[in-house]
């Protein structure tokens, strides 16, 4: 299939009658000229990057997954068609990454994907602008900077909570690649996303260069005069330079990026009750199962026990009997217990999801109310307009309330030294933890803020039971590795029904995982760390750099447009010579 955007291929094919693969070039050209075929190809090409994420986790595929989409957009006959290819590819990407939402939101999933897919329309235009035809060295070099910048702007905009949050950022697909995690510590997930797009752009440029060289060779065997650029103008050299620059940056980060400084260990227990049948008594059954699992931790010398999201379905102030039961567990185990209360509060109107720390004497007073809610799952944006979503899927019947600030908690207070350890400064009993709830672990800024506020251990309490046996649990669990690498702090991902996992300060996995079929309590010896990563210190600098690139591009394009306009206005009119008769005398008007 010819995606080069050069119709000379088709002319050469007609001239020499040769075929390229199983289809003729003419057949490929007709398919791409068809509005419906081309649209289907765009959706399919846009969906390919989803294979790099869990559960397939083909991380290496991310570095070439965008190439078919890029080649399609660059071959668009018009800028409008390239933007359409970008939109349809974005739709395909969003559906593929979030397809597990279909059983819950049904057709509304496609509506959301179509709206968010519009963010890629300008990116499709940029692809054609910088990769169309056979770009010379200057334009190819610019493509290696502009296209990653455009992609980062798409990721930044769709990372807004109201648009679904930063789920499926391209850099997150590299959660198990150690060199990529080192880059994450320098520029966050954004830097890895940009580098992945740079490599894809380089590969696309190499494909364009190879196509141009092949066309040149074919033309040399005909009588036609080749009008292709000379070989030195082809984009292969900038493409190779861009790929080499990514490899060099990765090696530099590996060698020189600050590494977390070891600061002891903490024994953290994760309690995962597993699937509990829905019903009026489900909250009681879940609590009973969590109590039974927690009792198995007695005598195992743990420093903190973590339960998953919505692990307690009662407000502890309204149900002091439940608070006393959890406090008794804390005394029995010899450690504080971090629970997650999903209930209507007795002291405020509305339903909150809150991380609550419970010690031997009851709730310690540390409480974090979830700030960023899942659109349609926990609230409906513009409910007066979109409330009909509750009739076509499992959208929230009542909006949850949100907290207004993050909280760093101190564990081990008032334990009385039950574990026989020194409770002085710097020990596990002074462990400062930063809780996050559910998809808040997808937001890089939240874990960065907790680290700046002094958190030594990041915790994400989650529940993906609505999406059991789909790609959602492994996708969610993988985010803990990225957040840990960004901040240089270990992260615990504790769930109700799996997948629960723990990652060290460098993003490496600690111990095994608790899968979606597990109902168990597991203890992890978690390494703690101090120090400050470049990302914690400098924040989202790759996004700021990308914004500057796009601003500079906009200024350049505007100046070029005004220059062309002014030249057309000032150019003298070209008058045609007056017609003459056969006797070389001017024609008389009117005769």
Image: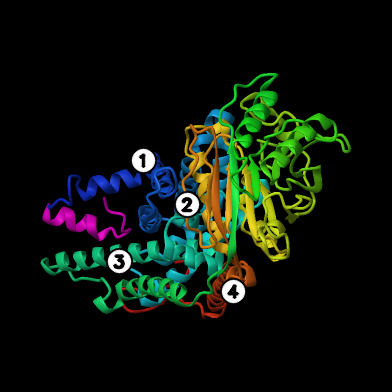
Instruction: Determine whether the residue tagged by mark 1 lies in a helix, strand or loop.
Output: helix
262 or 569, which lies in front?
Answer: 262
Question: Which range is magenta?
Answer: 1-17
Q: CA distance from mark 4 to mark 2?
A: 23 Å
Q: Residues within 10 Å of mark 1 (few under 14, many from 20)?
A: few
- What is the residue that sits farthest to the top in this orientation? 280
Disc 2 versus disc 1: nearer the observer: 2
465 or 525, which lies in front?
Answer: 525
Work out which quarter of the rendered image holds the C terminus and state it: bottom left
Q: Residues within 10 Å of mark 4 (few under 14, many from 20)?
A: few
Q: Earlier in the sequence, mark 3 or mark 4?
A: 3
Label 1 near label 2: C-beta < 8 Å?
no
Q: Earlier in the sequence, mark 4 or mark 1?
A: 1
Disc 2 versus disc 3: nearer the observer: 3
- Residue 317 on the magenta segment: no
Disc 3 versus disc 4: nearer the observer: 3
Q: Earlier in the sequence, mark 4 or mark 2?
A: 2
Reading the image, the residue beneath label 3 is 206
383 or 556, which lies in front?
Answer: 383
Q: CA distance from mark 4 to mark 1?
A: 36 Å
| Residue 3 placement (x, y as % from top left) | 31, 55
Reading the image, the residue beneath label 4 is 555
């Amino acid at each position: 299939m010819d995606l080069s955007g050069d119709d000379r291929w088709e002319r050469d094919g007609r001239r020499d009658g040769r075929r390229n693969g199983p289809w003729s070039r003419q057949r490929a050209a007709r398919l791409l000229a068809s509005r419906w075929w081309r649209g289907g190809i765009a959706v399919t090409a846009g969906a390919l990057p989803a294979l790099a994420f869990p559960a397939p986790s083909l991380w290496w595929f991310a570095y070439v997954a965008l190439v078919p989409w890029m080649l399609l957009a660059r071959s668009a006959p018009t800028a409008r068609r390239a933007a359409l290819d970008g939109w349809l590819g974005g739709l395909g990407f969003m559906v593929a990454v979030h397809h597990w939402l279909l059983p819950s939101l049904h057709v509304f999933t496609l509506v959301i994907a179509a709206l968010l897919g519009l963010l890629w329309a300008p990116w499709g235009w940029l692809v054609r602008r910088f990769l169309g035809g056979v770009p010379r060295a200057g334009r190819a070099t610019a493509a290696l900077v502009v296209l990653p910048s455009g992609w980062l702007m798409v990721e930044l905009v769709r990372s807004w909570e109201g648009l679904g949050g930063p789920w499926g950022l391209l850099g997150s697909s590299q959660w198990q690649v150690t060199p990529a995690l080192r880059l994450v510590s320098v520029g966050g997930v954004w830097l890895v996303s940009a580098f992945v797009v740079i490599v894809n752009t380089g590969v696309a440029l190499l494909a364009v260069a190879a196509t141009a060289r092949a066309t040149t060779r074919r033309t040399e065997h005909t009588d036609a005069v080749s009008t292709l650029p000379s070989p030195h103008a082809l984009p292969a050299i900038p493409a190779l330079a861009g790929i080499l620059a990514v490899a060099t940056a990765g090696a530099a980060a590996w060698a020189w990026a600050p590494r977390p400084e070891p600061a002891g260990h903490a024994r953290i227990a994760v309690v995962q009750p597993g699937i509990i049948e829905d019903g009026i008594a489900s909250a009681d059954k879940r609590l009973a199962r969590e109590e039974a699992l927690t009792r198995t931790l007695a005598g195992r010398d743990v420093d903190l026990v973590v339960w998953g999201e919505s692990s307690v379905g009662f407000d502890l102030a309204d149900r002091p009997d439940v608070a006393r039961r959890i406090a008794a567990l804390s005394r029995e185990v010899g450690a504080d217990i971090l629970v997650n209360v999903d209930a209507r509060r007795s002291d405020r109107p509305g339903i909150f999801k809150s991380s609550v720390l419970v010690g031997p004497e009851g709730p310690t007073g540390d409480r974090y109310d979830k700030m960023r809610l899942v659109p349609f799952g926990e609230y409906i944006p513009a409910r007066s307009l979109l409330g009909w979503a509750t009739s076509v899927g499992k959208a929230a019947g009542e909006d949850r309330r949100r907290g207004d600030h993050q909280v760093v908690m101190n564990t081990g207070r008032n334990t009385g030294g039950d574990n026989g350890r020194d409770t002085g400064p710097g020990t596990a009993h002074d462990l400062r933890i930063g809780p996050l709830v559910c998809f808040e672990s997808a937001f890089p800024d939240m874990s960065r803020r907790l680290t700046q506020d002094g958190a030594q251990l990041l915790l994400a309490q989650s529940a993906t039971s609505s999406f059991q046996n789909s790609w959602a649990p492994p996708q969610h669990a993988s985010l803990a590795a990225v957040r840990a690498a960004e901040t240089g702090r270990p992260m615990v991902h504790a769930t109700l029904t799996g997948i629960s996992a723990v990652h060290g300060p460098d993003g490496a996995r600690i111990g095994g995982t608790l899968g979606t079929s597990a109902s168990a309590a597991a203890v992890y010896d978690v390494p703690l760390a101090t120090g400050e990563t470049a990302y914690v210190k400098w924040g989202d600098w790759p996004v700021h750099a990308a914004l500057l690139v796009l601003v500079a591009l906009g200024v350049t394009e505007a100046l070029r447009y005004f220059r062309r306009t002014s030249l057309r206005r000032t150019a003298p009119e070209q008058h045609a010579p007056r017609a003459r008769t056969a006797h070389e005398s001017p024609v008389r008007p009117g005769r």
